[in-house]
Image: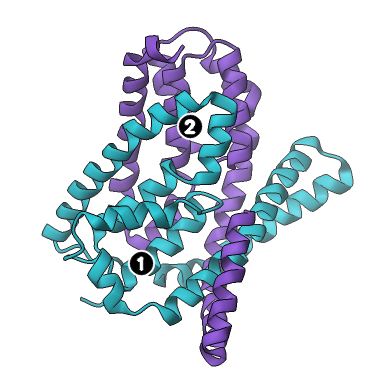
Amino acid sequence: MKDTKKKFPVRIALFAVFSGFIAVSLITGYQPGRDLGSNFLSFLLEMVQVLPAVFILIGLFDVWVKRETIEKHLGQGGGARSFFWVFILAAPMAGGLLPALPIAHELHKKGARFTVVMAFLGAVGIGRVPMVLFESTFLGIRFSLIRLLASIPLVIVTAVFMGRYLDKTGYRIPGEEP
Amino acid sequence: MTILYIMTALALLVSLLFNRKKTGKAILSGAKKLRKITPPFLSVLMGVSVVLYLVPQEMISRTLGGSFSFASLITASLIGSITFMPGPIVYPLCRILVNRGVAYSIIAAFSTTLMMVGAITFPMEKSLFGWKFALMRNLVSYFIGLAIAAVFFLAQGVLI
């Protein structure tokens, strides 16, 4: 997270320009600016609804779950059963990839292996219950079933290969001491 | 969303019953992490709103319409990769696409890449996990999207 700090003034400037543009559009009635603003607000609203809960859970996880527990079930010795836990963890997630990223980061910090982190992010993409409910409502239960049956093995197999590769090359995520 | 809040409430309650001090620490730790992630989050949301403005639903359904072709598959997966939409928007849009005659395999590529590949979330993923991890995960996820499309292509007779 080091480079976040460095970029901070740029981000503030960007944000100021962005909100300034929307404010001016609102006053002058410039339609593209208004559309942009309403897009931004609807996304912000969705995230604001999800994030407090997600981060309370992350905090509780941080305080209560011992590193050894994660290492045992999701670490190097976790074996195939780790994947079961990964899909259980991902199933109730709301909001998609965005709020899942900090959760995956937290898992890794507590000792989950790369394969598990990759599988978790994949599982969030393909197997969240709220998403599958929406999907089967609009596209039919058969569509959801075929998609799940095809994607679950793909996610697991690719996660194993990516995890192995990252382990073998001794990959370290930024800001993490060796 | 409701499930998430029920779960959070239950977890908080259980935590409070066991140890109030630790629960306070948990909330503080969560708040700290949330504050740290807010600036990159806001940039992602700005990017999302700009991209969704530039690629409106009308344009997506116009580009992908008609029967299956390799070009529309690639277009669908690329649009899915660069855009980011909340679930409640994605699936109704997919329904509209199906009604307009877009092949199921293309819908599958579109929705899968939409959910798994994040060009817009890339900067945040990179700052959390490093560029190599982020690049690899997104590239592999893109090909998972194509592979799922292939499965749907083969299962065509079964589906409809």
Check the rendered structure and report the hue given to chain A: cyan
Disc 2 target residue: B111
Of B75 and A71, nearer the camera is: A71
Q: Quadrant of residue B28?
A: bottom right
- Residue A78 left/right relative to B96: left
- Whether residue A93 is situated above or below residue A145 in the rendered picture: below
The quadrant of the picture occupied by the N terminus of chain A is bottom left
Q: Name the secondary structure under disc 1.
A: helix
Q: Position of residue A99 (x, y in %)?
A: 51, 57
- Residue B143 left/right relative to B84: left
- 2 and 1 marks in contact (CB < 8 Å): no
Q: Position of residue A48 (x, y in %)?
A: 66, 60
Of B41 and A126, nearer the camera is: A126
Q: Quadrant of residue A163?
A: bottom left
Check the rendered structure and report the hue given to chain B: purple
Q: Residue at x 47, y 7 (%)?
A: B67
Q: Position of residue A132 (x, y in %)?
A: 51, 38
Q: Position of residue B26 (x, y in %)?
A: 52, 81
Q: Amino acid at mark 2?
A: Ser
Q: Residues within 10 Å of mark 2 (few under 14, many from 20)?
A: many
The quadrant of the picture occupied by the C terminus of chain A is bottom left
Q: Which mark is residue A107?
A: 1
Q: Name the secondary structure under disc 2.
A: helix
Q: Chain of mark 2?
A: B
Q: Which mark is residue B100?
A: none
Q: Chain of mark 1?
A: A
- Whether residue B3 is situated above or below residue A133 in the rendered picture: below
- Whether residue B5 is situated above or below residue B111 in the rendered picture: below
Q: Amino acid at mark 1?
A: Leu
Q: CA distance from mark 2 to mark 1?
A: 26 Å
Q: Residues within 10 Å of mark 1 (few under 14, many from 20)?
A: many
